[in-house]
Image: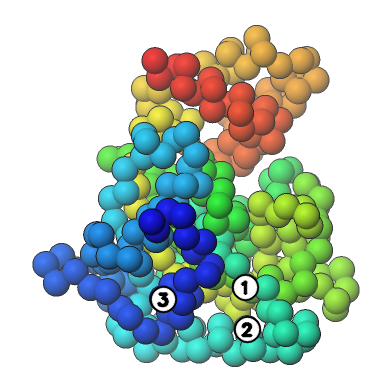
Amino acid sequence: MAAQVEIEDQESVTNLDNGEIINPGSQPPNFSGESTILLRESTFEHDLVKNCFLTGMGSFANETTIVTVRKNSTERRITTKAKFAVFKIFTEAMTKKNNGDANVKYGWYSGSKEEIDRVITYGFSNREIEKFENDVGSHGVGIHLVHHRYSLAAALVGEGDEEGIKNILLCRVILGKPEQIEAGSKQSYPSSNRFDSGVDNLENPRKYVIWSSNMNSYILPTYIVSFKSPLLRGLIGRARSPCVSFSALMSILSKSLDVTRMNLILTSYDDFRKRKLRREQLVRKIREVVGDHLLFKILKNQRR
């Protein structure tokens, strides 16, 4: 089954210059004009990406509905084809630099539809970098992606539309030789020429950090997954969501956390209310302090 197959080992997925799969009966894609194609349901590539995403959602998978899976196409725009070629060149260069191992992985990048549309069309920019500059939970100042097995971590901070549809990018990422970056670090480039990227943990990395100088060379946006997950909407959606508001969450957490941890969260929450902190930054801080297990348990209990 596709869910049991490691996405990085599939030639039909990693060899992205071939095998475009188009749904002849679909409407024109609403991402980036002509830069993406809609993958037909029940095809190998569609299901592989879908199962990769749902597997990473853990216990939230049953509450999550995949709306569409789109692929950044090399045939639709000549500039996209050029970006694929550039990525291939840098992969080959990294392979030579690091004795035959470019260390190419897949990682999730979350953002609003408008942001993802912009990234697909023009690439990453300082606007994406700024998302992490003042984030105490970020591991350096750069483009942050989440290991493909942990899609929930990216989905949790995603921004949905009025219908609750959220979008997430699955990107190919050249890590080369990474170095460990501590949370809250303001590092914005490699500490030496021996390193090429950053991670939160060398032994079991969950977060990848690509520095701004390499963000459009080492990252290749490849798939867009659009999904609905009502259980997550209360925490990451709009304030009027009926699931769990931030104010209610503060009250619940105060009964479970010690004074030190609760004060850390309340300080961040106060900054959020004063508009010094964005919603996704507050969510990252809550996850960092509370831990995913307790946070998800609270969300589930509130849904009952």
Question: Which residue, given by chain and number where applicable, does mark 3 sit on?
Answer: 12
Residue reaching furthest to the right:
192
> What is the spatial separation of the Cα atoms under label 1 and label 3, in whole angstroms?
16 Å
Question: Which residue, given by chain and number where applicable, does mark 1 sit on?
Answer: 104
Residue at 33% from the left image edge and 80% from the top image edge = 19
Task: Give the x, y percent position of residue 78.
Answer: 37, 89
> What is the spatial separation of the Cα atoms under label 3 and label 2, in whole angstroms?
18 Å
Residue at 78% from the left image edge and 15% from the top image edge = 259
Question: Which residue, given by chain and number where applicable, does mark 2 sit on?
Answer: 91
Contact between marks 2 and 1 (CB within 8 A): the answer is: yes
| Residue type of the residue flagged with mark 1 | Val
Q: Is residue 237 visible?
A: no
Q: Nearer the viewer, residue 225 or 283?
A: 225
Residue reaching furthest to the front:
1
> What is the spatial separation of the Cα atoms under label 2 and label 1, in whole angstroms?
8 Å
Number of residues whose C-alpha sits closer than 10 Å to that of mark 1, classed few (under 14), some (14–19) or many (20 or more): some
Residue at 41% from the left image edge and 76% from the top image edge = 12
Residue at 41% from the left image edge and 65% from the top image edge = 223
Number of residues whose C-alpha sits closer than 10 Å to that of mark 2, classed few (under 14), some (14–19) or many (20 or more): many
Q: Secondary structure at mark 1?
A: strand
Relative placement, left or right, of 145 versus 32 is: right
The quadrant in which residue 228 appears is top left
Task: Work out which quarter of the rendered image holds the C terminus and state it.
Answer: top left
Q: Nearer the viewer, residue 249 or 96?
A: 96
Q: Which of the two marks, 3 or 2, is nearer to us in this view?
A: 3
Q: From the viewer's perspective, is residue 261 above or below residue 275?
A: above
Task: Give the x, y percent position of residue 115.
Answer: 45, 59
| Residue type of the residue flagged with mark 3 | Ser
Disc number placed over residue 167 in the picture, else none? none
* First along the sequence among labels 1 and 3: 3
Contact between marks 3 and 2 (CB within 8 A): the answer is: no
* First along the sequence among labels 2 and 1: 2
